[in-house]
Image (cartoon, helix red, strand yellow):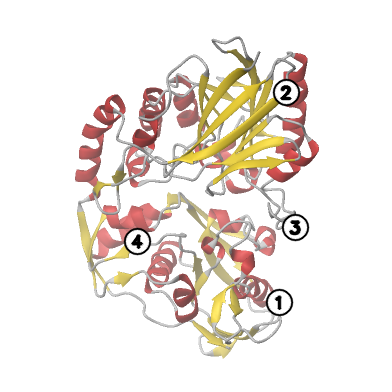
Amino acid sequence: MNRNLTICFTSDIHGYFSDMDYALGTPGAAGLSRCASTFPDDGNTLVLDGGDTLQGSPFAYWLSRDPVEGAKVSAQAMSLAGYDFVTLGNHDFNYGREALESYLSHLDARCVSANVEGLPGVDRTAVVKLQNGLRVGITGVTTHFVNLWEKPENLEGITVHEAFPAAAAALEELKQANVDVTVCIYHGGFENDLMTGELLSDTGENQAYQICRELDFDILLTGHQHQAKADLQLFGTHACQSPDRGKQYVRMDVTVSGEGEVTAHSQLINPGEAEESLAAFLAPLDAQNAVFLDQPLGELDIPLLSGDHIEMAANGSAIANFFNQVQLEASGADLSVTSLANVVKGFNRQVTIRDVVATYVFPNTLKTLQVDRRILKAALERSAEYFDLDEAGQLRVGQSFLMPIVQHYNYDYLSGLEVTMDIRRPIGDRVTSMLYQGKELEENRLLTLCMNNYRATGTGGYPLYAQCKLVKDQPTEISQMIIEYIDHHKYVVVDKRKWLHIVY
């Protein structure tokens, strides 16, 4: 006799609980409330989430002003959506242990994580019996790169072990529990090309392909990379990945035969109408948030408009110059680097809080490192990999910034150093000139360079930064620094200098 299980899976909601488009201030066609309205409600359905819930939207930024209470609101939203189990994403640690404990304690769903220790309310594994008698074993794991990215004080008393061995141990626990179906919710993505099997990244940040290849979970639900992938069959494991912000969710229909054979098919489901109870809960909060976000801060001398990523990188972005301008004043450093999100809103001349938090979307703080020419050249060569030439000799984005995920945010814009790159030259040998105050930078000249805390760990292909002397560590979020900068100056003349010159 066959028995069935339905799984509804989201990941990387990033604070987009309602259907509000926070950049525009109007409702859109995505968000958790629109997904939740189409989740089946029966005894043989499990609603699961892959983490990165607490951070990432202007709404989440507004909640983070009181992170403990804000996390409670996030938990209430997830509970109203009907989640049964969740795991943790790397961004769920961004607001500290107390906020994360508040989220977990107010959450109706159970949190499973085999590689996160030290948090109350987190189980290594769970077994749930469905109405039809199926015993489903569930575990979760989080990319252990949390240890690189997160501020140490936010991980105090928390240990994040390596993901793969933790998943392997959890699978053995579930097998010992004699479950019919094994499910792993992994806040991580695929490190190999899913068509060819080619290894795309060997950092260990993403290990989903290895989990499928070397472990025999029946089902692997992935996130982190924000890619929409359904109906994957990898080495006997049924796998998928949910896109971010509730743009879609994955519905997986699982059948277990009388002989115990597990088959599954999944599809991406578009959001429907907003779920009534969740929408009613969020509506007054969105209204309060809108008042906060639309507060005027000041004026820029020019609008800072977004453009095509390759054009901004090659020709300079006034948005990036402005972010660097803020960082330089805040840090007192000689040089500054910043990056732009995959989706960049930009600024009109009149700036509101909404503009800032919708354009600088990262929860980063600022660090200042001591660097020399060798360090700077290595970092610039990494950014130079962003550029490639097509058959017509025109610039395009290099594949290493597009695969296995799109990562425009790992291209760095530098201010304070005039750089020339020749893209016709081999990767690793493209930087031909580095002028500081009009003169070629000497080999032994020490400078200070400020950057976000994410980049300071060496992540994104900049490993030498992790070896540099830390000069200053500023705990204020950079988005808050931008808000305070505009509020203080009221009228801002943006740096318009073109710091990078590309030859091709």
Q: Gap in Å between the C-alphas at discs 1 and 4?
A: 32 Å
In the image, what residue type sits under mark 2? Glu
Q: Residue at x 77, y 27 (%)?
A: 169
Left or right? Give the position of 317 relative to 355: right
Q: At numbered mark 4, what does the secondary structure look like: helix, strand or loop?
A: loop
Q: Could you say which is closer to the camera, residue 84 or residue 233?
A: 233
Q: What residue is pinned by disc 1?
A: 428
Q: At numbered mark 1, what does the secondary structure look like: helix, strand or loop?
A: loop
Residue 146 lies, in percent from the top left, at 61, 43
Where, quadrant-wise, is the C terminus in this rendering? bottom right
Q: Gap in Å between the C-alphas at discs 1 and 3?
A: 23 Å
Q: Gap in Å between the C-alphas at discs 2 and 1?
A: 51 Å
Looking at the rendered image, the disc whose residue lies closer to the viewer, 2 or 4, is 2
Looking at the rendered image, the disc whose residue lies closer to the viewer, 2 or 1, is 2
- The numbered mark at residue 261 is 2
Marks 2 and 4 in Cβ contact (< 8 Å): no
In the image, what residue type sits under mark 1? Gly
Q: Gap in Å between the C-alphas at discs 2 and 3?
A: 30 Å
Residue 421 lies, in percent from the top left, at 59, 84
Q: What residue is pinned by disc 3?
A: 198
Q: Along the polypeptide, which appears first: circle 2 or circle 4? A: 2
Q: Could you say which is closer to the camera, residue 25 or residue 325?
A: 25
Marks 1 and 3 in Cβ contact (< 8 Å): no
Q: What residue is pinned by disc 4?
A: 345
Marks 1 and 4 in Cβ contact (< 8 Å): no
Regarding residue 162, the answer to whether it shows in the image is no
